[in-house]
Amino acid sequence: MTFRSLLIIKAVVCLVFGVFLLLAPDVLLGMLGGSVNEAGKFTAREYGAALIGTLLLTWFARDVRAADARRAILLDLLIYDLIGTVITLAVVLSGVLNALGWGICVVYLFFAVGSGYILSKEKSFQQAHASESC
């Protein structure tokens, strides 16, 4: 997987879930076995807005070349998706979400592993390139 492909896939996932959370949070959470009151709808819509922000970041940064910018983006996505994995895992295991919640957990884990992999690959490339310059 490449930096570009990871960011494009992330952008598409953020588009789907972001729009769904903005427009119909109760429907999405209901499909996952959860229920939501008005405060929960507000929080879900706020998260939908954050996903739209991540969508824009990942889409417009997909072709960035600067190594420090790529590292910052990958580190952000790695931490974000690791936290999402842990939180979703805890919620699924506690029974708040149904079996479809495992799909959300897998999506977070996919992006965490992908970001970590590309981050480590780019870091080793930078180290090898720096040692060639000496």
Image (cartoon, rainbow, N blue to C red):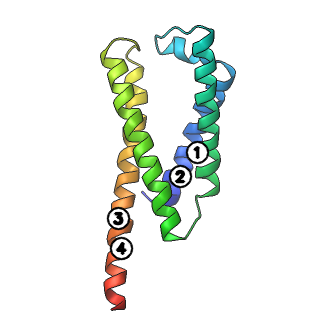
Query: Residue beneath label 2, please?
Result: 7
Q: Label 1 vs label 4: CA separation? A: 25 Å
Q: Label 3, on which residue?
A: 121
Instruction: Indicate which disc residue 125 carries.
Output: 4
The answer to whether the residue labelled 4 contacts the one labelled 3, judged by CB atoms less than 8 Å apart, is yes
Three-letter code for the amino acid on which mark 3 is drawn? Lys
Above-or-below relation of 64 to 76:
below
| Image position, residue 48 (x, y; %) | 61, 30
- Which of the marked residues, 2 or 4, is nearer the chain's N terminus? 2
| Res. 26 in view | no
- Indicate the position of residue 1 as horizontal and vertical percent values: 42, 57
Q: Is residue 63 left or right of residue 96?
A: right
Vertical arrangement, residue 127 with respect to residue 123, above or below: below
The disc at residue 11 is 1
Q: What residue type is labelled 2?
A: Leu
**Percent x, y of residue 81:** 42, 40
Query: Residue sitting at 44 percent across and 41 percent down?
Result: 80
In space, the residues marked 3 and 1 are separated at their CA atoms by: 21 Å
Quadrant for the C terminus in the image: bottom left
Mark 4 closeness class: few <14, some 14–19, many ≥20 residues within 10 Å: few
Task: Measure how far apart labels 2 and 1 are at the Cα level.
Answer: 6 Å
Element carrying mark 1? helix
Q: What element carries label 3?
A: helix
Marked residue nearer the N-terminal end (3 or 1)? 1
Circle 2 Cα neighbour tier, 10 Å, few/some/many (<14 / 14–19 / ≥20): many
Badge 2 element: helix
Q: How far apart are marks 2 and 4 (CA)?
A: 19 Å
